[in-house]
Amino acid sequence: MSTAAIPFLSFGSQHDPIREQVLAAVAEVYDSHWYILGDAVRCFEAEYACYSGTTHCVGVGNGLDALYLSLKTLGIGQGDEVLVPSNTYIATWLAVSMTGARPVPVEPDASTYNLNPALLTAALTPRTRAILPVHLYGQACLMGPILSFAQRHNLWVVEDNAQAHGATWQGKPTGSFGHLNATSFYPGKNLGALGDAGAVTTDSAEWAQQLQLLRNYGSRQKYHNEIAGVNSRLDELQAAVLRVKLPYLAEWTAQRQQIASWYHAYLSDVPELILPVTANDSTHVFHLYVVRSSRREALQQHLAMQGIGTLIHYPVPPHMQPAYATLGYHPGDFPIAEELAATALSLPLWPGLTEQQVKRVSEVIRGFLLE
Ligand SMILES: *Cc1c(COP(=O)(O)O)cnc(C)c1O
């Protein structure tokens, strides 16, 4: 079997076949001489809203801004609390603290790693204003129980759909459940731009309008500023690239799911290894294929020596980051998040990865853990 290196991520088989198409779309923007909030942004917003099953989409500069501006639109700020997963990329928490509100961590289900709806009640206070579920690694959260909890307690719901483009819960797409839903098109996401990009989806025309103001200096008419906004517009060139890529997303997602099932077939009998579990009613679009091992560091090193790239998502949970020292949390406060941070390892998974390559990664893992 080939022992060629297997990178953690490779864009080749996604980007090489559509090179001409992408460059033609870029050239079209170039020649249009219209570079900010033009036809490409407008068309992509319409197409991505349709894809998400919502009536509106507002393109913004990146995923963090998509989250932050969503919370601003709902009026969240100083003195408010927002329920967030204890195990997520720090952007989810940063969006909350950027508004002046406090992120309040809730532990995940220990097998799916997504927000555990049964633990929401314990985190609730009179200051709680919103829940921010994250469809982590590409698996849809249990949106039914989360939405009914929110309704019972009069809370806003903002989905963080940065990792789960195309996932569903009970057949309905992620990015369509919350009052507002944020996503990222960072290059490595399932739908990625060639730089920073993000979007908010919603069924509310009023909130969509507010977001259009917020992302563009609070201005509808040039040099007339209705509110104190920011500059966070979806770039016209990135929108043109995303328009080319969106129609391929279903095929790329199918490939991700195929790769995950190969890993499952080759690794499910390794007792020391915990594989991803998908909840009933949820689909998983495998932004990441995260396994867990108590010998994670040694396993990662062994794979690296065989030329196999892996990453850790994420090595330090937000409550243990120096950035959040002021919140006053201690080791042991969120044991599931801490256990995940200590044991998680993301294996190579990208459209184009072959069964032979998956087999090789699996054999190297088996050789190490079963020796
Ligand atoms: C990538 C990501 C973000 C932030 O997206 P950017 O476009 O990098 O700002 C937010 N939340 C999650 C869960 C992410 O994976």
Image (cartoon, rainbow, N blue to C red):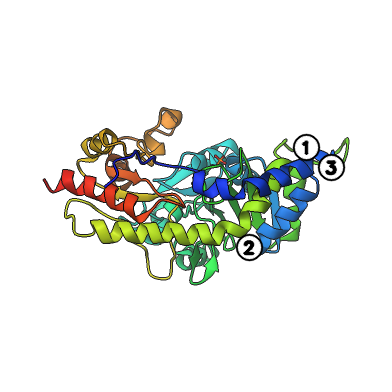
Outermost residue, front side: 1
Instruction: List the residue tagged with mark 2.
Output: 51
Residue 22, percent from left and from top:
66, 46
Query: What's the residue type where badge 1 is placed?
Result: Tyr
Residue at which label 1 appears: 217
Question: Few, some or many C-alpha atoms within 10 Å of disc 2 (few <14, some 14-19, many ≥20)?
Answer: some
Q: Mark 2 or mark 1, which is nearer the start of the sequence?
A: 2
Ligand 1 within 8 A of label 3's CB?
no
Quarter occupied by the C terminus: top left
At horizontal 62% and vertical 52% (from top left) the residue drawn is 245
Quadrant assignment, res 270 = bottom left
Kindly tell me whether residue 238 is visible in this rendering. Answer: yes
Callout in the foreground (1, 2): 2
Task: Give the answer, above or below, for where 64 lies relative to 55.
Answer: above
Image spot of residue 155 (x, y percent): 56, 57
Q: Is 313 left or right of 193, judged from the image as shown?
A: left
Kindly state the secondary structure of the residue where label 1 is placed: loop
Crowdedness near tag 3: few (<14), some (14–19) or many (≥20) residues, C-alpha within 10 Å: few
Decide which of tag 2 and tag 3 comes sooner along the chain.
3
Where does the image place residue 63, in percent across and percent down from the top left? Answer: 58, 43
Query: 81 left or right of 1?
Result: right
Amino acid tagged 2: Tyr
Please tell me which residue lies in front, 345 or 103.
345
Q: Which residue is mark 3?
A: 32
- Give the Cα distance between marks 1 and 2: 28 Å
- Front disc: 3 or 1: 3
